[in-house]
Amino acid sequence: MTRPSLKVEDLHVSIEDKEILKGFGIEVNGGEIHAIMGPNGTGKSTLASALMGHPKYEVTSGNATFNGEDLFEMEVDERARAGLFLAMQYPSEVSGVTNADFVRSAINANREEGDEISLMKFIRKMDEKMNTLEMDETFQQRYLNEGFSGGEKKRNEILQLLMLEPKIAILDEIDSGLDIDALKVVAKGINELRSDDFGCLIITHYQRLLNYIKPDFVHVMMQGRIVKSGGPELAERLEAEGYDWIKEELGIEDETVGQE
Ligand SMILES: Nc1ncnc2c1ncn2[C@@H]1O[C@H](COP(=O)(O)OP(=O)(O)OP(=O)(O)O)[C@@H](O)[C@H]1O
């Protein structure tokens, strides 16, 4: 079995004619967990949105492939069907659609006609994953994210991740707003997916999450591109010392984008 892979090369992305990503590159393969850290406003969420095909983000140059296929040539739903998953910083609320319905149709959208998941199998799987995430069963019948607390929304996104079993997941600040217990539960869910058939890109501000999900690679993003890569020790140093030493090392005066 070939491992899944997401390759991004020299990516430039603009929003309303303002260039945010300026030559971003990364390769995430099955079996690998990558963490991206970086000061506010350096383009981390822009990267996630651009890869998932958000219409507001214009790819001006560079390329991305998912399992060898040109990602930007794929329709947005094709990307999801091929096994790319995005958990967002601010998950949206959808009234009138229950969690269970949403997840079941997402699973079936990824399957061929006639090969839909049976209701029994779906319920069993959903129960098992909700158990892993220590979620109350009433969540299944509640409308998608409606009235959920911030932490509940994040947990719900990880439930979707466990149910959909994507090949590559991009998790944008899934730790923000989580209490310590929820953080551990979310980490447990992600660690459960670890295998050669699953790769993960975690965007985070805090090393704390990485205590529970050990990354293979840590990347620092500034001014719309990766400026430094290393192992977990890099995240520890950032937690202890902040970003100034990297800026000094690289001669960067202002980490924010779009102002130069
Ligand atoms: N939809 C948008 N419209 C206009 N500007 C945007 C939009 N999305 C992002 N930007 C701008 O792009 C820049 C990068 O934003 P982005 O959210 O990608 O940064 P980030 O690294 O994820 O920041 P944070 O760590 O604060 O989450 C910022 O200057 C932001 O204001």
Image: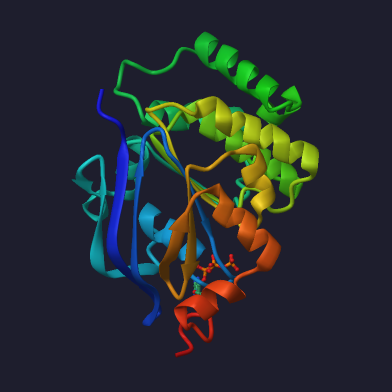
The image's colouring method is: rainbow
* Residue in front for this viewpoint, 231 or 57: 231
Q: Position of residue 205 (x, y in %)?
A: 63, 59
* Residue in front for this viewpoint, 156 or 213: 213
In which quadrant will I find the N terminus? top left
Residue placed at 57% from the left, 51% from the top? 233
Question: Is residue 97 in view from this perspective?
Answer: no
Instruction: Establish if 237 lies above or below 22.
Output: above
* Residue in front for this viewpoint, 69 or 243: 243
Residue placed at 74% from the left, 47% from the top? 178
Q: Is residue 5 left or right of residue 44?
A: left
Q: Residue furthest top?
A: 120
Count of residue discs: 0
Q: Position of residue 179 (x, y in %)?
A: 79, 45
Q: Residue furthest bottom?
A: 260
Q: Is residue 77 left or right of residue 129?
A: left
Residue placed at 60% from the left, 50% from the top? 91
Q: Position of residue 239 (x, y in %)?
A: 67, 60
Residue placed at 67% from the left, 67% from the top? 241
Q: Is residue 164 left or right of residue 205?
A: left
* Residue in front for this viewpoint, 84 or 101: 84
In which quadrant will I find the C terminus? bottom left
Question: Is residue 189 in view from this perspective?
Answer: yes
Q: Position of residue 227 (x, y in %)?
A: 43, 68
Instruction: Establish if 86 lies above or below 224.
Output: above
